[in-house]
Image (cartoon, rainbow, N blue to C red):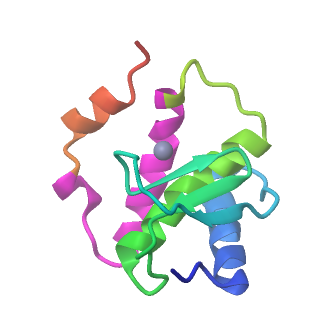
Amino acid sequence: MIGPSAAFLAGMMAWVASVTGLPVPPTPKIIFDTVWTEDADAYALPGEIHLKRNWDQNRTQDQAYLAHELVHIAQWAAHVKYHCQNEAERLAYAVQAIYLSKFAVDFWEDHPPRWLAGKEECR
Ligand SMILES: [Zn+2]
């Protein structure tokens, strides 16, 4: 249950900002939920990111989850308007995929475009 170091978090926030064009948001609070009830590997609320207790800064997949949630933090901080939360996922998943591709991990292998399309629809 060790969160990202301040330097790692700052570096990731700067990278997310450079990839998305969104301003660097205020540093979010990192929270490790005692009980994990979400059907997700991480989630964000305005100003806070919730990570699983076994989140590991040295694991590429975990780093990518952090990048994904930082996109949402940046979206909220910049007051970007979306029709629904699913629409906001588009950018977050794209950033997650770009992050993983830096480490030669293919996001699309586990997340077929058809799956993603369903996730991104406003209904
Ligand atoms: Zn998301």
Q: Which residue is depicted at the point 71% across and 85% down?
A: 7
Query: Residue 61 placed where, x, y %?
Result: 36, 71
Residue nearer the viewer, 14 or 61: 61
Left or right of 63 on screen, residue 24: right
Q: Which residue is depicted at the point 35% across and 69% down?
A: 101
Residue nearer the viewer, 31 or 118: 31
**Could you say which quadrant of the image residue 78 lies in?**
top right
Residue lying at the far front of the rendered structure:
34
Query: Residue 37 placed where, x, y %?
Result: 40, 48
Report the quarter where the C terminus lies: top left
Left or right of 109 on screen, residue 42: right
Residue lying at the far right of the rendered structure:
26
Query: Residue 45 placed where, x, y %?
Result: 64, 45
Q: Is residue 98 above or below residue 60?
A: above
Q: Which residue is depicted at the point 51% across and 43% down?
A: 91
Q: Is residue 96 above or below residue 88?
A: below
Residues in magenta, as a range: 86-110
Q: Main secondary structure of the magenta part?
A: helix
Instruction: Reply yes or no: does residue 49 show up in magenta.
Output: no
Q: Which residue is depicted at the point 53% across and 29% down?
A: 85
